[in-house]
Image: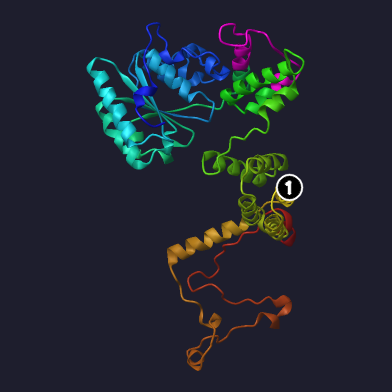
């Protein structure tokens, strides 16, 4: 959004509603069904319910600058508009995707002029995580002076994406993904509302409402947009007012899963995948695998995690796990998607079902501790390689016992440096191959 931010300012109406809420004919259902009060705001009761800290601050008109962090369609923009209405504030909305420092300065200059006449300004910055450091720094002094009240909206973790100075002067409120119950309430309200909704003119066939809720994935905007399109599809089918499940599927088409390969969702889902394999839950592991691959995750990223899992979590409990994971990595690289899902799925299930041991990790950690604490201790002379005559004369290799000269190639001699003799770093696990070898 570029140009004069005042073009996007929403002033307070005399009836206590935002002037921008007076929508043009033909406005989308999702826009028409925006809640018009905090009591209508469904799904985030922990934030706006009676007695909550945010609700109390709004009712006292003592709102600090805040960051609203939540997934798409959870109500961040709507909540900002409701806050402006409830606190009798003008709101200037900027999109961090398109706005620059010049836009910010114009918005702040307007806010100062409004303040001279006793009008409070809320500067709403959508996708604030997309503002660079210079843009965020331009906002900071005005937040400190109280020229504006900042409401930033982000789908990304603000502790990583918002400058520490700005974050320290704001309160972060987390919006949750809408539950199925909340979505059902929003959909039903849109279906029966006679003023701005569908007026009860349509109904759902068995399973259609549940399909809509499932495919919406906690996103109210997605649900309402799909509902509106499903109504049109049903009407085009012999003028039907009954929405079928396949109408919903057609409306949704192939919904883009909520998954940002560079953001929190990326790390949350891969974390769930790793922990499901580690905890020997093949069903959950395959589910999270599908979530990643269907959302467009790089299959080689998943393949690399499988190789790590095979060593870190299965380890010596099943020595076949690592070569199988490496084979899956090679196969996925060779054939690419979509067929790469076969070796990746096979490896995922195998690793989930395999016995688990992190004895290798524990052994290395113990050895590293010894290195950190004792430093680079000298290699025992008998283990050193006597590559020259001088080394021979200095005793390199003297007294070394060749393992293959002993039964089972097992020889007792000092292999650790002086001072660490008798130390134990590797402790076998209690399952799989390690249990059998004890």
Q: Is residue 194 magenta?
A: yes
- The verdict on residue 289 being magenta is no
| Residue 255 image position (x, y, % from top left) | 64, 32
Q: Is residue 147 visible?
A: no
Picture quarter containing residue 334? bottom right
Residue 130 picture location, percent across and down: 43, 38
Question: Is residue 349 something one can see in this rendering?
Answer: yes
Task: Please report the residue visible at 49 percent of the width from the left and 33 percent of the height from the top.
Answer: 155
Which residue is at a point 37% across and 13% down the rendered structure image? 12
Which residue lies at the image location 59% right of the left edge and 83% below the top edge?
Answer: 400
The residue at which mark 1 appears reads as 349
Q: Is residue 418 above or below residue 287?
A: below
Q: Which residue of the protein is positioned furthest toward the left in this rendering? A: 116
54 or 364: nearer the eye? 54
- In the rendered image, residue 93, in percent from the top left (x then y), is placed at 39, 25
Displayed quadrant of residue 171: top left
Q: Quadrant of the C terminus?
A: bottom right
Question: What residue range appears in magenta?
Answer: 185-210
Q: Residues within 10 Å of mark 1 (few under 14, many from 20)?
A: some
Residue 132 left/right relative to 154: left
Kindly state the secondary structure of the residue where label 1 is placed: helix
Please name whichever residue, 434 or 236, is drawn nearer the observer in this view of the structure. Answer: 236
Vertical order, 434 against 127 (above or below): below
């Amino acid at each position: 959004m570029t140009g004069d931010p005042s073009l996007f300012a929403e002033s307070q109406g005399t009836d206590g509603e935002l002037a921008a809420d007076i929508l043009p004919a033909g406005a989308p259902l999702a826009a028409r069904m925006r809640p018009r009060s905090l009591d209508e705001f469904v799904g985030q009761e922990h934030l706006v319910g009676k007695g909550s800290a945010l609700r109390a601050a709004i009712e006292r008109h003592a709102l600090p600058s805040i960051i609203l962090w939540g997934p798409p369609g959870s109500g961040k923009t709507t909540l900002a508009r409701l806050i402006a209405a409830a606190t009798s504030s003008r709101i200037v909305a900027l999109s961090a995707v398109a706005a620059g420092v010049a836009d910010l300065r114009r918005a702040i200059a307007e806010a100062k002029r409004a303040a001279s006449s006793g009008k409070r300004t809320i500067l709403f910055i959508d996708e604030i995580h997309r503002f660079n450091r210079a843009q965020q720094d331009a906002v900071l002094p005005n937040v400190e002076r109280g020229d504006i009240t900042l409401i930033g909206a982000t789908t990304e973790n603000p502790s990583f994406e918002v400058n520490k100075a700005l974050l320290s002067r704001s309160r972060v409120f987390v919006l949750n993904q809408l539950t199925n119950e909340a979505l059902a309430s929003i959909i039903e309200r849109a279906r029966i509302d006679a003023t701005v909704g569908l007026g009860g003119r349509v109904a759902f066939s068995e399973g259609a409402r549940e399909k809509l809720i499932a495919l919406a994935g906690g996103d109210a905007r997605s649900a309402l947009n799909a509902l509106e399109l499903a109504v049109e599809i049903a009407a085009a089918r012999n003028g039907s007012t009954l929405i079928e499940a396949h109408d919903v599927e057609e409306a949704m088409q192939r919904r883009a899963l909520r998954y940002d390969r560079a953001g929190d969702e990326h790390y949350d889902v891969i974390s769930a995948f790793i922990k499901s394999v580690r905890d020997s839950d093949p069903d959950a592991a395959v589910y999270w695998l599908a979530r990643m691959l269907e959302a467009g995750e790089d299959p080689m990223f998943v393949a690399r995690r499988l190789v790590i899992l095979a060593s870190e979590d299965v380890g010596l409990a099943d020595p076949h796990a690592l070569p199988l994971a490496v084979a899956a990595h090679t196969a996925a690289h060779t054939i690419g998607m979509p067929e790469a899902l076969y070796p990746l799925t096979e490896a995922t299930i195998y690793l989930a079902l395999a016995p688990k041991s992190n004895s290798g990790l524990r052994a290395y950690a113990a050895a590293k501790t010894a290195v950190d604490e004792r430093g680079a201790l000298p290699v025992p002379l008998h283990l050193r390689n006597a590559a020259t005559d001088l080394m021979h004369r200095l005793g390199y290799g003297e007294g070394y016992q060749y393992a293959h000269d002993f039964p089972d190639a097992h020889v007792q001699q000092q292999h650790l440096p002086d001072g660490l003799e008798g130390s134990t770093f590797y402790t076998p696990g209690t399952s799989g191959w390690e249990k059998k070898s004890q």
